[in-house]
Image (spheres, grey):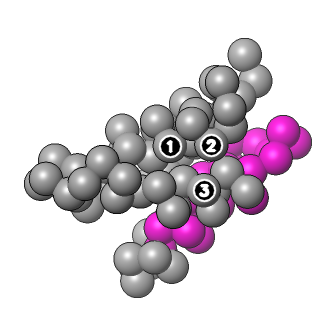
C-alpha cells in the first residue's frame, strides 16, 4: 500500500479533535496526511514519526501537543510501513 494511504488511514483513525466524528468531510485530514507522508522516511523511528505528526498537527491547528500524544498512531504507521 502507498505510504500516503497508510498514513491517512491512521491519521483519520486518530481523528484529531474528533472532527470526523463530528461530521467533518472525509477529506478533513488529507493535507496533513500528505505533509506527514512527505516527511516520513523508512529510517525514522516510531518517536521520529510521532514528532512529525505533532509538528504537522500542531502547526495546522495552532496547538502545542507533545509528540507522546501521537505515539500510538506513530506505532501503527511504523509497523505497517515495515511489514
In the rendered structure, does residue 46 fall within the stretch colored magenta? yes
Going 72% across and 16% down the picture, which residue do you hit?
83
Going 57% across and 36% down the picture, which residue do you hit?
5
64 or 28: which is nearer to us?
28
Circle 1 SS class: helix
Which mark is drawn over residue 4?
2
Circle 3 SS class: helix
Residue 13 in the figure: left or right of residue 38:
left
Question: Mark 2–mark 1 contact, CB under 8 Å?
Answer: yes
Residue 67 in sight here: no
Quadrant (top left/top right/bottom left/bottom right) for the N terminus:
top right
Going 12% across and 54% down the picture, which residue do you hit?
22
> Which portion, as a residue range, is magenta?
39-58
Residue 9 in sight here: yes
Dividing the picture into quadrants, the one containing residue 28 is: bottom left
Label 3 Cα crowd, 10 Å radius (few <14 / some 14-19 / many 20+): some
Identify residue for label 3.
34
- Give the x, y percent position of residue 48: 72, 53
Circle 2 SS class: helix
Label whose residue precedes the other's in the sequence (2 or 3) = 2
- Give the x, y percent position of residue 59: 51, 79
Amino acid at each position: 500500500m502507498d505510504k500516503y494511504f497508510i498514513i491517512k488511514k491512521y491519521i483519520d483513525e486518530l481523528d484529531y479533535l474528533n472532527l470526523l466524528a463530528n461530521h467533518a468531510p472525509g477529506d478533513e485530514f488529507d493535507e496533513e496526511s500528505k505533509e506527514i507522508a512527505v516527511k516520513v522516511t523508512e529510517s525514522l523511528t516510531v518517536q521520529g514519526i510521532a514528532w512529525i505528526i505533532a509538528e504537522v498537527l500542531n502547526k495546522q491547528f495552532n496547538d502545542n501537543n507533545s509528540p507522546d500524544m501521537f505515539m500510538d498512531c506513530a506505532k501503527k504507521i511504523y509497523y505497517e510501513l515495515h511489514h
